[in-house]
Image (cartoon, grey):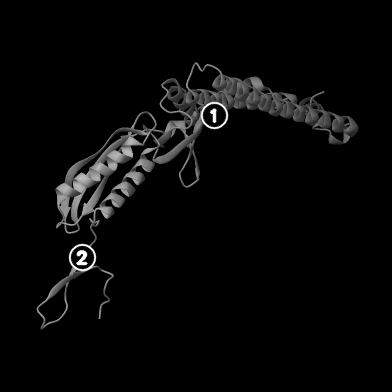
Amino acid sequence: MPVGGLLEAGLGQIGGLDWPVLGLAVGTTLLKILAVVLVARLAIILTNRLIDRLSNRHSRGRPVFDERRVHTLAGVAKSTVRYALDFFAGVTSLSLVGLDTSSILLGAGVAGLAVGFGAQNLVRDVLSGFFLLLEDQYGVGDYVNLAGVEGIVEEIGLRTTQVRGFGGELHVIPNGSIPRVANFSRGPLRVMFEVCVPHRVDLARVMAVAQEAVDHYAAGSKVLVDGPKILGVSRLDSAGVHLAVWARARSMEHWAVERDLKLAIKEALTRAGIDISHPYRLRRHGADSGKDGLTRPDDRREG
């Protein structure tokens, strides 16, 4: 007899209950609930392994979808199976203790209405996750900006998306709170920076040396899509003349390309005897000498 039936039969007459029978019923029910939970956990583990095996086999064979899409769908399948089996285990456990799960499933009465209002965010997250997957807005391994969080997508579920930041932190973002998606992995990205040289240098020579350096880098690069080009003077200020450098590189490679181009230009200018601009300040060496000089900020200490 379920625990709920025993409680209804003898709750008013505690002294008249058969305690060994009650204890046996409670123990049997707890064992059944434990068995249901263990079976659900085991089913989740086995299903996850099966999904991983199928996705790995797809990657080794002739892929129908790209690898990013396969990993995304595998993560969603795992998430869906986990939610479904957890829900099944919960409902089965409630029925084992004698509770009427039909009213819970139907959501009848005031309690069902309250649950409905409370589940609005959950429904919104699930629906948003469904359309994110349907439209393939991003996938596992993409470099994205979601809800102000920037990083690499590690997992996509029907309710949440997990993004790993560049500091190592893991952000779990509800799909319903993603107002817009910035995906940096769907095409080449721009590389843009400036090189500052002193006003007194020959700009034509500087641009020729810098262009030759970036052309030499481009000849040996496999990640550049377009450029690099020395666009010319971008701005003038007290620090010097700023030259704009532009290129396009494959996604996730643009940071390395920018660093390499800066190093190549710096080394080429140094070999040509051209200094990178640095701040100077005007100082008078003596009141009677009438001579002024330019010194670097750290060349002389204030007296």
Which image quarter: residue 31?
A: top right
Residue shown at the point (44%, 32%) measured from the top left: 142
Q: CA distance from mark 1 to mark 2?
A: 69 Å
Left or right of 107, for residue 147: left
Residue at disc 2, secondary structure? loop
Q: Which residue is mark 1?
A: 115
Residue 50 spot, x, y in % from top left: 64, 22
As drawn, 157 above or below 279? above
Q: Is residue 104 visible?
A: no
Q: Nearer the viewer, residue 35 or 213?
A: 213
Q: Which residue is mark 2?
A: 280
Other-residue count near label 2 (Cα within 10 Å), few / some / many at <14 / 14–19 / ≥20: some
Left or right of 93, for residue 194: left
Look at the image and tell me in which quarter the N terminus lies. Answer: top right
Amino acid type assigned to the residue bearing label 1 in the image: Val
Other-residue count near label 1 (Cα within 10 Å), few / some / many at <14 / 14–19 / ≥20: few
Q: Earlier in the sequence, mark 1 or mark 2?
A: 1
Residue 126 spot, x, y in % from top left: 49, 26
Which image quarter: residue 240?
A: bottom left
Q: Is residue 209 visible?
A: yes
Left or right of 11, for residue 298: left
Residue 299 spot, x, y in % from top left: 27, 71
Q: Nearer the viewer, residue 226 or 119?
A: 226
As drawn, 242 above or below 287? above
Residue 74 spot, x, y in % from top left: 55, 24
Q: Which mark is residue 269?
A: none
Residue shown at the point (74%, 25%) measured from the top left: 96
Q: Nearer the viewer, residue 109 or 30?
A: 30
Amino acid type assigned to the residue bearing label 2 in the image: Tyr
